[in-house]
Amino acid sequence: MDKIQLIDTLPNVFVNRDDVVSDIWNKEVSFERGKLYLVEANSGTGKSSLCSYIYGYRHDYQGRILFDGEDVRLYSTSRWTDIRQKRFSLLWQELRIFPELTALENVNIKNKLTGYQKKTQILEWFEMLGIADKLDAKMGRMSFGQQQRVALIRALCQPFDFLFVDEPISHLDDANSDIMGRIMAAEAKRQGAGIISTSIGKHIELPYDQVFNL
């Protein structure tokens, strides 16, 4: 997939409001594969909704979303399944981890399905992110910042044309934020993929091609 377009897209909850000022809502916006984007937003302006709309998880919006010129409202369930397996990877704001499983088990759930990353690469990321000692720790006993790092590794265990990261460093210090950014950018470059990162303040420092204010 090379391009995502939003045309006059607006969450249904905002339809009757006349005070929506945004670079994305009710505009024509494109995200291109291979480029880096930052979406800055205030709380409650639809940041997580944007990710959910593009990912096909929610459909409560007006306007159109197009993938390479095709309206996603016409997609079948099997088409969405294929997109989520091969085209999109999403690091959810709430992470969606399994607290009763270990850090490595959470990552391996996806990697065993995809067979995409070598174990040596996964272990290298754990080491780089300072959580190599947490491989066998239950996720429910780890801090949210540690969980964010594990969730990123899991998100990278599949092919993608676009990587979506929703407030990925909200609980990280600057050093770990920088490392996460380098890992994301390197993997996206290797796959020729784009990155769409959201923030309500603190954001990963990357050479963004475009910054939007939601």
Image (tube, rainbow, N blue to C red):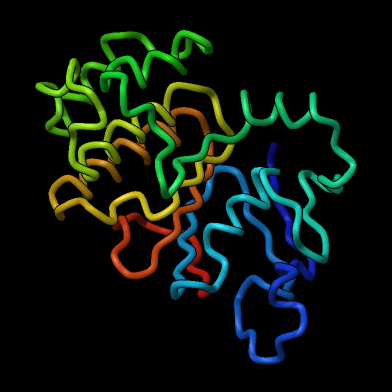
Q: Quadrant location of residue 152?
A: top left
Assign the N terminus to one quadrant of the image: top right
Considering depth in this image, is 14 or 194 the residue closer to the camera? 14
Asked whether, in this view, residue 34 is left or right of residue 154, the answer is right
In the rendering, at what x and y percent does residue 133 appear?
9, 22
Assign the C terminus to one quadrant of the image: bottom right
In the displayed structure, 168 sits above or below 29; it is above
Residue at horizontal 13%, vertical 49%? 175
In the rendering, at what x and y percent does residue 186 appear?
35, 35
Residue at horizontal 71%, vertical 86%? 17
Asked whether, in this view, residue 80 is left or right of residue 191, the answer is right
Residue at horizontal 70%, vertical 67%? 11
In the rendering, at what x and y percent does residue 191 appear?
50, 29
Asked whether, in this view, residue 56 is left or right of residue 107, the answer is right
Q: Quadrant location of residue 77?
A: top right
Q: Quadrant location of residue 207?
A: bottom left
In the displayed structure, 42 sits above or below 191; it is below
Asked whether, in this view, residue 164 is left or right of residue 184, the answer is right
In the displayed structure, 26 sits above or below 167; it is below
Residue at horizontal 27%, vertical 37%? 147
